[in-house]
Amino acid sequence: MKWLSMKDQAEELLDRAFMALADPARRQIIARLSRGPATVNELAEPFGISKQAVSKHIQVLERANLVSRSREAQRRPVHLRPERLEALTAWIDKYRLVHEQQFRRLDGLLDTMKKGDNNEH
């Protein structure tokens, strides 16, 4: 395995997270886990897919660091890692804020132009 810088590692995790969330079943699993931990059996209930298929989806979410598993006696509940979702939101917000600033500048320019037009009449 090649060595990755911290920035490259962060980008790799970001890529994995967005790829994991591209699947509707995985997004539904994340939505369910937002209400609390659940076992594979509990996560499989609302889907028309096998527990094995749900387990594969969970593995993808684990590789993306979006969920984790713990061991409680015989149970192995899956837990949402909300800090990872917050990191995705922060990444999205960074670019959203840039565009909002551009729109504010454009609004200011249009207001200035409108006032200039009103003063000429």
Image (spheres, rainbow, N blue to C red):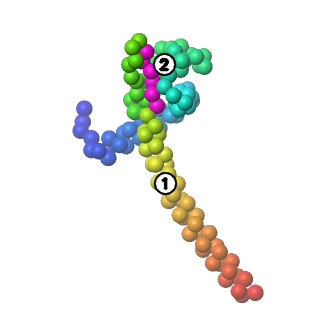
SS label for mark 1: helix
Could you say which is closer to the camera, residue 88 or residue 118?
88
Q: Is residue 19 found inside the magenta-colored segment of the image?
A: no
Q: Compare residues 109 and 29 and report the one nearer the observer.
A: 29
Dot 2 corresponds to which residue? 39
Callout 1 touching callout 2 (CB < 8 Å): no
Q: Is residue 31 left or right of residue 16?
A: right
Q: Residue at x 55, y 30 (%)?
A: 35
The residue identified by callout 1 is 95
- Tell me which label, 1 or 2, sits earlier in the chain: 2
In the picture, the quarter occupied by the N terminus is top left
Q: Is residue 53 visible?
A: no
Q: From the top left corner, tell me how far across and down residue 8 is, in percent.
A: 32, 44
Residue 19: where, in percent of width, then height? 47, 34
Give me the disc on residue 13: none
Q: Quick check: 26 left or right of 4?
A: right
Q: Amino acid at mark 2?
A: Thr
Range drawn in magenta: 75-80
Q: Specify whether 110 is left or right of 30.
A: right
Mark in front: 1 vs 2: 2
Q: Residue furthest right?
A: 121
Examine the image and state in which quarter residue 106 appears: bottom right
Q: CA distance from mark 1 to mark 2?
A: 36 Å
Q: Dot 2 surroundings within 10 Å: few (below 14), some, or many (20 or more)?
A: some
**Viewer can see residue 81:** yes
Give percent across and percent down for residue 7: 32, 47
Q: Secondary structure at mark 2?
A: loop
- The kind of residue on which mark 1 rests is Tyr
